[in-house]
Image (cartoon, grey):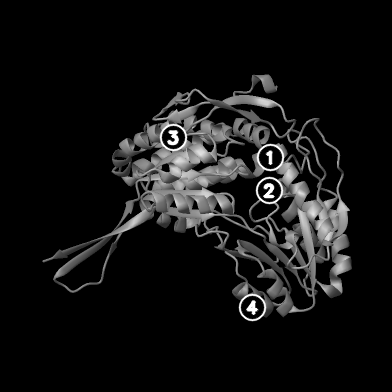
Amino acid sequence: MLKDIYLPSHLWINGRACEAASGEQFDCLSPRDGKLLVRVAEGGKDDIDMAVQAARSASDTWARQAPKQRRRHLLQLADIIESHQDELAFLESLDTGKPITHARRDDLPLSINCLRFYAEAIDKHYDEIAPTASDVLATIRREPLGVIGAVVPWNFPLMIACWKLAPALAAGNTVVLKPAEQSPLTAIRLAELASAAGLPDGVINVVPGYGKTAGAALGRHPDVDAVSFTGSGPVGRLFLRYAAESNMKAVFLECGGKSPQIVFDDADDLDKAAQAVAQGICYNQGQVCSAGSRLLVQQSIADDFIDRVLSHVDTWSLGDPLDPATKMGALIESKHLERVQRFVDIGHAEGAALVSVGNQHSPCEGGFYFPSTIFDHVQKDMTLAQEEIFGPVLAVTRFADEAEALELANATRFGLAAAVWTSSLSRAHRMSRDLKAGTVWVNNYDGSDITVPFGGFGESGNGRDKSLHALDKMSQLKSTWIQF
């Protein structure tokens, strides 16, 4: 089966496949078994220059298309992705180690829906006329930024690429997309399908490569007007530096989190909450920026609730990502597996109490598998409570009352998401108001829709993906003052 699958391995610039200018390639390994999938063209500065030039050349024509024309193009792209969704889900699972069932159920439908949402929004986004004196006409127009650099992570490569591409293209921008070197395959295939759907050459360009070369060249490029980045905080800081060193381009960042699930003793359904806590740390092997990696639970119910969580975590057993029955697959690469293990070792050393470690078998020999791991009695200043581990490691902290729960929840430099489990409407409102997080879920976890913005406070970043707010980010305002 694997030998028959098409594995794209080239750059995509100005509507055609090409090799890197240097001729260099890098290994693309499958987390499933650690084996080589394909050698991918390693883009660098020269390739970024060509991709930006192609995007700039296509920019005016694309921006000046009637909104209904851009709408048609994006809808055609959504349709062609839908017709290839089994292929893309297979590629995504093979390339990232995520369960193929989740790729089919979540990544592909959400990507397709994202494209259709922004396509349908294109011709419903109106400009404005300011309320001036009667002898003046002042118009406020939304104009494209120009060329957008989109840098996406390896945990949801296709979906987050669509989060970046769809509003950028809808607003009339062209894009140079740099996928993570660990997961470049669906990004390349997406560009091929975009050309097949009729998008003009140069509107979408894809340059796989390393961050220190291709990523830095994109961030520093003087003809890139904005960069939209999802990834780690240290790399997000680099893009801010690159902007300062070049043309002061806009930089939109989403840089992870350390999100708490806060469970009060008056929660209506503790078993539902426990199930959500298990899913919040085990889904995608914990490699989710909004993973519920901290459990804050009220002391009076802590022991019982932790037992409930354990019973649900046990259902998230490791398996072959390509097996439709698998709920928990592989971590992205061996280096990341070692990183997660280091955090577990630090948890032991700092005195957190290990409660549970899941089955430590490897479903596929050579793969990068890590079991769910739960620590109790984690203090707020411990590494487990402060650092984004990006793996299936849950840190449990007990609290006495609402004030302490709030203090613990906000005792982090991140602020991406949080959840509150309570039957008190007043408490739900108080906590939602005072939690420093871009999203607060009440009596659920990870509820979302393309109509709702996603992004964080603090060191979780300054950007917003999804919703009409992302469309606003991809345009700039021009005021025209006409004196009669």
Mark 2 belongs to which amino acid? Gln
Mark 3 belongs to which amino acid? Lys
Near mark 1 (Cα within 10 A), the count class, few <14, some 14-19 or many ≥20, is many
Closer to the chain start, of discs 1 and 4, is: 1
Q: Which residue is mark 1?
A: 332
Q: Label for residue 430?
A: 4
Point out the frontmost of discs 2 and 3: 3
Closer to the chain start, of discs 4 and 3, is: 3
Residue at image position (70%, 40%) is 335
Query: Between residues 343 and 59, which one lies in front from this camera angle?
Result: 343
* Residue 8 visible somewhere in the drawing: no
Q: Which residue is mark 3?
A: 45
Closer to the chain start, of discs 1 and 2, is: 2
Mark 4 belongs to which amino acid? Arg
- Asked if labels 3 and 4 touch by Cβ distance under 8 angstroms, the answer is no
- Asked if labels 4 and 2 touch by Cβ distance under 8 angstroms, the answer is no
